[in-house]
Image (cartoon, rainbow, N blue to C red):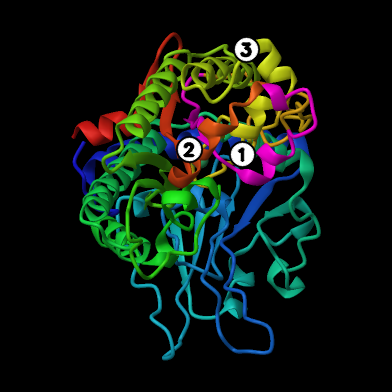
């Protein structure tokens, strides 16, 4: 795979027609079930800050991104009619305040009947005449932008599309591999900045420079946490000054290519051998879980299996005592590991459809006592998901164990030892195969 992230990448271009074919089949089915003849997919528009004329960073409709790799094309529409070449209504406004989208160019252009418009007012002429036969998909907060289409995001069609997005096409897999490579290059630069004693802010800047993203282009806000900050699951404060002693470093940061994301976490120790040994133990546990990923596995069971493995790690590390079942039942493992094992990954970092039982939209609940698990599906070929077990010293959760049967199972002196290091999370992005898996993250670091 060549690591060209642009839409001139010939390797991606070769896979794109087949991707469009898969999307076409998916939309044919969704339209049929919804009793409609045309899907009109709106790219979205920037939101304006309250009492201001400032545009918030634009986040395109992921349904639009699944069709075209154009993350900066607001006020544009795709019109899909079964059996016809999809129309892309490409909005290139007359606007001297902002950079406007350039002329359509890239591997994707051959798949569309492109209609350039210079104003939203010109969109209507390119839409199907009978709006009653259309469904619209997108965030439409101004009725005028629906152009009299009454059925906006109908559940029947949207559920079918969301469920189908779980399994990725070859084009999407290639794009996700590139996003992983891009992310890995940032992680390597960030580790070097940590070893160099730099502040969270400087490490973050080193990461952004390596992946060539502005903050707004990152798929999610980087978590760059030194020492105790590693125990804050979504720490994004970025201290401007380095700590006196950089003991540990947890970084959860991704990158994107054509709107597809990677989501990678690594944890490092500077010199403490005991903490390094715990990181190593968590990594071998994480790799053990990854090795259980294959089609047909119920992800909920993988999450529970992780808790049992974590119980053994807690005992080995002298953070807890007792057998695994007891440590699960009393809530000890959940206090050290209070989030889900992972989630689907794709256009959205927490990709849609994680709870879906089928395309009808019925859902599967997470196991009782594990409300934060975001993926409850049985794994299927070409799904891409994260495996991200963690172990943290979170005072609030551990203190909740006081006065409960769990209290006597926690080795509080070892918790004191762990606290200055924050915590550990190791996260890989994994593609499901029939009886195997592809670890996009490990492959990317190996390059
Ligand atoms: Mn994640």
* Residue at the (40%, 78%) spot, across then down: 100
Magenta span covers which residues? 381-408
Mark whose residue sits in front, 1 or 2: 2
- Distance from Cα at disc 3 to Cα at disc 2: 21 Å
- Distance from Cα at disc 1 to Cα at disc 2: 51 Å
Percent from the top left, x then y, of residue 20? 45, 40
Q: Is residue 400 magenta?
A: yes
Q: Which label's residue is closer to the chain start, 1 or 3?
A: 1
- Distance from Cα at disc 1 to Cα at disc 3: 46 Å
* Residue at the (55%, 40%) spot, across then down: 393
* Residue at the (77%, 29%) spot, across then down: 363
Residue 363 horizontal side relative to residue 318, left or right: right
The residue identified by callout 3 is 324
Q: Nearer the viewer, residue 319 or 109?
A: 319
Residue 362 position by quadrant: top right
Dot 2: element: helix
Which numbered disc covers residue 27?
A: 1
Q: Quadrant of the C terminus?
A: top left
- Against 323, residue 120 (above or below) is below
Residue 410 position by quadrant: top right
Q: Which label's residue is closer to the chain start, 1 or 2?
A: 1
Q: Which label's residue is closer to the chain start, 3 or 2?
A: 3
């Amino acid at each position: 795979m060549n690591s060209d992230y642009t839409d001139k990448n010939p390797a991606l271009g070769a896979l794109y027609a087949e991707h469009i074919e898969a999307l076409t089949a998916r939309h044919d089915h969704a339209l049929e079930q919804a009793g409609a003849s045309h899907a009109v997919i709106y790219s979205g528009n920037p939101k304006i800050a309250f009492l201001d004329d400032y545009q918030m960073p634009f986040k395109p409709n992921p349904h639009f991104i699944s069709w075209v790799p154009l993350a900066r094309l607001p006020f544009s529409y795709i019109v899909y009619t079964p059996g016809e070449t999809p129309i892309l209504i490409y909005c290139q406004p007359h606007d001297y305040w902002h950079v406007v989208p350039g002329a359509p160019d890239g591997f994707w252009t051959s798949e569309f009947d492109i209609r350039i418009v210079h104003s939203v007012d010109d969109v209507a002429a390119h839409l199907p005449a009978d709006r009653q036969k259309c469904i619209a998909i997108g965030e439409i907060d101004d009725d005028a932008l629906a152009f009299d289409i009454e059925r906006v995001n109908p559940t029947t069609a949207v559920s079918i599309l969301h469920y189908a997005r779980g399994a990725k096409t070859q084009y999407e897999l290639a794009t996700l591999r590139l996003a992983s490579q891009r992310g890995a290059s940032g992680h390597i630069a960030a580790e070097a900045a940590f070893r160099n004693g730099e502040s969270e802010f400087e490490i973050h800047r080193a990461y952004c420079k390596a992946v060539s993203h502005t903050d707004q282009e990152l798929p999610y806000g980087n978590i760059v946490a030194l020492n105790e900050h590693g125990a804050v699951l979504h720490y994004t404060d970025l201290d401007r000054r380095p700590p006196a002693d950089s003991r540990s470093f947890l970084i959860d940061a991704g990158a994107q290519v054509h709107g597809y994301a990677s989501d990678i976490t690594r944890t490092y120790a500077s010199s403490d051998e005991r903490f390094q040994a715990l990181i190593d133990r968590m990594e071998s546990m994480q790799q053990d879980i990854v090795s259980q990923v294959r089609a047909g596995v119920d992800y909920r069971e993988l999450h529970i299996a992780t808790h049992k493995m974590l119980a053994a790690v807690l005992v080995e590390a002298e953070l807890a005592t007792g057998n695994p079942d007891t440590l699960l039942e009393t809530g000890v493992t959940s206090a050290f590991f209070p989030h889900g094992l992972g989630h689907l990954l794709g256009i959205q970092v927490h990709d849609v459809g994680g709870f879906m039982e089928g395309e009808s939209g019925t859902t599967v609940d997470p196991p009782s006592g594990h409300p934060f698990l975001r993926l409850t599906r049985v794994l299927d070929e070409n799904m891409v998901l994260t495996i991200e077990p963690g172990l943290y010293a979170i005072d609030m959760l551990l203190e909740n164990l006081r006065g409960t049967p769990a209290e006597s199972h926690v080795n509080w002196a070892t918790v004191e030892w762990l606290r200055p290091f924050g915590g550990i999370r190791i996260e890989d992005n994994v593609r499901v195969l029939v009886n195997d898996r592809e670890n996009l993250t490990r492959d990317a670091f190996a390059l």
